[in-house]
Amino acid sequence: MLRLLARWWARISYLWALEVEGRKSEINASLAKANAEASRKLVDQLNAEADAIEENVKKVEAEEVARKSAPEYRKLTKQEKYDDERNSKKEKDAAVQMVIEKRNLARQEIENVKNREQVAQTLRATADINAAISK
C-alpha cells in the first residue's frame, strides 16, 4: 500500500512540475513577444526620428543657400563667412552623426526583435511539450 501511495505521489509531483514549468514557459513566451513588439515600436520611432533629422538638414541646407545669396551675407568679411560656414558644417556633421547613431540603434533593435521572437517560439514549444507529456 505504501509503494502504491509513493508511486501515485511521484506521478502527481512529476506532472505538477511539468505543468508548472509549462505555465512558466507560456508566461515567459508572452513576455518575450511583448518585448519584441516594444522593440519594433522603438525601431519605428528611431527611424522616424532619423528621417525627421535628415529632412531638417535638407531644409536648413536650402535656407543656407538662400541666405548666402542675400545682400547681407555678401557684406560679411571673409573671416565672418568662414566662421559661419564652419559653424554650419559643425551643426550638419552633428546632425548626420545623430542620424547614423539612430540608424545603427534601429539595426541593433531589429536583431533584438528577431532574438526575442525566437525565444518566444522556443518557450512556446517547451510549454506545448510539457502540456503533451502531462496529458
Image (cartoon, helix red, strand yellow):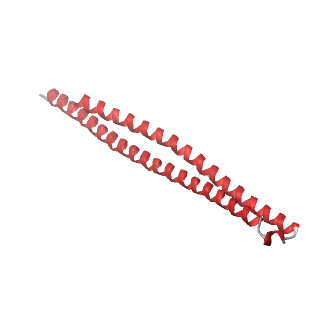
Instruction: Locate residue 97, reporting x and y percent.
Output: 67, 53
92 left or right, relative to 2: right
Name the image quarter holding the C terminus.
top left
55 w.r.t. 33: above or below: below
Instruction: Locate residue 82, reporting x and y percent.
Output: 84, 63
Decide which of 88, 122 is in the foreground and name it. 88
Instruction: Locate residue 77, reporting x and y percent.
Output: 87, 70
Q: Residue at x 33, y 44 (%)?
A: 27
41 w.r.t. 5: above or below: below
Q: Residue at x 31, y 38 (%)?
A: 21
32 left or right, relative to 57: left
Name the image quarter holding the N terminus.
top left
88 w.r.t. 76: above or below: above
Decide which of 90, 52 is in the foreground and name it. 52
Q: Residue at x 87, y 67 (%)?
A: 79
- Furthest-left residue in this view: 1
Instruction: Locate residue 13, reporting x and y percent.
Output: 23, 35
121 w.r.t. 66: above or below: above
